[in-house]
Image (cartoon, rainbow, N blue to C red):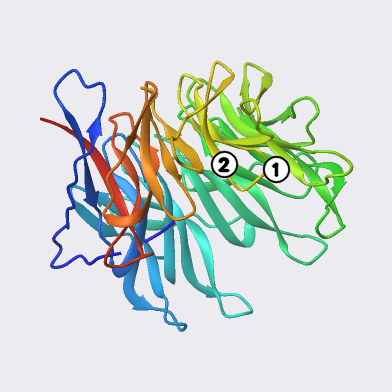
Amino acid sequence: MRRFLWLSLGVLLLACVAASCGGGSQGEAHWMITDLGTLGGPSSEAVAINRRGEVVGNADTRTKDKDGYPISHAFLWRSGKMIDLGTLGGPTSEAVAINRGGEVVGNADTRTKDKEGKAIAHAFLWHHGKMSDLGTLGGPRSWAQAINASGQVVGYAETTVKDEDGQPVAHAFLWQAGKMIDLGTFGGLSSRASDINDRGQIIGEADTTKKRLDEDDLRPHAIRHAFLWKKGKMIDLGVPPGRAESMASEINERSQILGWACLPCSARDPYWVASAFLWQAGRMTTLAPPRGRESCGANAFNEHGEAVGSASDGGAWPRPVLWRAGKASALRLPGELEGEALSINERGQIVGYGGDEQTSHAFLWYHGTRTALPGLGGGWSDATAINANSQIIGGSDTKERGFDLRAVLWTLKRG
């Protein structure tokens, strides 16, 4: 979530830079970058894009908070225009997802404040130009995470139950037809929903009755398991062999589920090592890192079950990875120390970032070829998502504004 430049008189500023894309059979291909602008402040970030090329994200406004920092609002970018989605009465809002019909979900501050004077946020649905408050499960706050084509929303919301520290406990929810439904847990206190497909199947993680000792605060914490919720029932997906906990992050229309699991490395090294997993047809398969890497995480996958993410050797430098048919392949980034693959579409086009200690640049990886995507003139950019029409969103800085990032859209032009 990031940031820069100014929208003046409602005119969209365009920065068009050409970069070669190998393998084109219909003439030379060039990637054009579009600066999506801001809501009057210095920076913006693109979060998600649908098939129609509509983009949602968050952008700084001209208004500043009491500490002098710009206040950010959720936006919808369509037909070359950035629309301010507003708030629920409080100062800020953020968008998290958009469906094929252009409905947006996110979280927005309400007029209500907590004991410390901070605005309390609720999950929202933006539909036909109006932001609606989705409410809570009895507690003060709620957070939206995803929306499907039918307008069903999932996330998590605080309940009236409190933990041992007196804080409200959150449960996964499904919101539909104006009602928020509590999805429950596996006997523990809390749960979260992270995604929903168009069939209404929901995934996330929930506390079990089992506990583990946390190395940081030396207190027992509930062990979490990934879940699949369908037909009114929460199904425990378990953990891969040798792992202790699991969390589900994404589900496709084939009911395949992507997530990650973790385990203690050894008694001498108490730090937890993560590994990606793919669940399908009742079976959870560990997505192992490439040879020479210790841990990995998957960020996204497509309808073919191809997943992308990164792997680490235990040091500070992650490397981008593609899993196809369960086999890991490192995506080579010549001359670069680190990188990560963040999104993949149905064509197998992969986007992410690669760089070194000084710079980072957005890339497209397709059929074994890496293409550098143009930036706005600064030394940093990343590509965070790509849709079925090869439209890519991400962020880039400029020479003028340094570390303030701008939401950008890359589109393919042939000529």
Q: Is residue 265 above or below residue 35?
A: above
Query: At 28% across and 36% down in the image, what residue appears?
Result: 391
Which of marks 1 and 2 precedes in the sequence?
A: 1
The answer to whether mark 2 and mark 1 are in CB contact below 8 A is: no
Report whether 320 appears left or right of 26: right
Q: CA distance from mark 2 to mark 1?
A: 35 Å
In the rendered image, residue 76, in percent from the top left (x then y), is placed at 30, 52
Q: Farthest residue toward the left?
A: 415
The mark found on residue 184 in the picture is 1
Work out whether residue 124 can be spotted.
no
Q: Farthest residue toward the bottom?
A: 66
Q: Secondary structure at mark 2?
A: loop
Q: Quadrant of residue 66?
A: bottom left
Query: At 80% across and 58% down in the image, what residue appears?
Result: 216
In the rendered image, residue 101, in percent from the top left (x then y), is placed at 31, 38
The amino acid type found where label 1 is placed reads Gly
Q: Secondary structure at mark 1?
A: loop
Q: Quadrant of the N terminus?
A: bottom left
Q: Nearer the viewer, residue 31 or 1?
A: 31
The amino acid type found where label 2 is placed reads Pro
In the rendered image, residue 171, in percent from the top left (x then y), is placed at 66, 49
Q: Is residue 140 above or below residue 214?
A: below
Category of crowding for the residue at label 2, using alpha-carbon neighbours closer than 10 angstroms: few (below 14), some (14–19), many (at least 20): many
Report whether 26 appears left or right of 91: left
Name the residue that disc number 2 marks.
318
In the rendered image, residue 167, in percent from the top left (x then y), is placed at 73, 65
Query: At 80% across and 38% down in the image, what residue appears?
Result: 265
Work out whether residue 81 can be spotted.
yes
Q: Is residue 323 above or below residue 138?
A: above
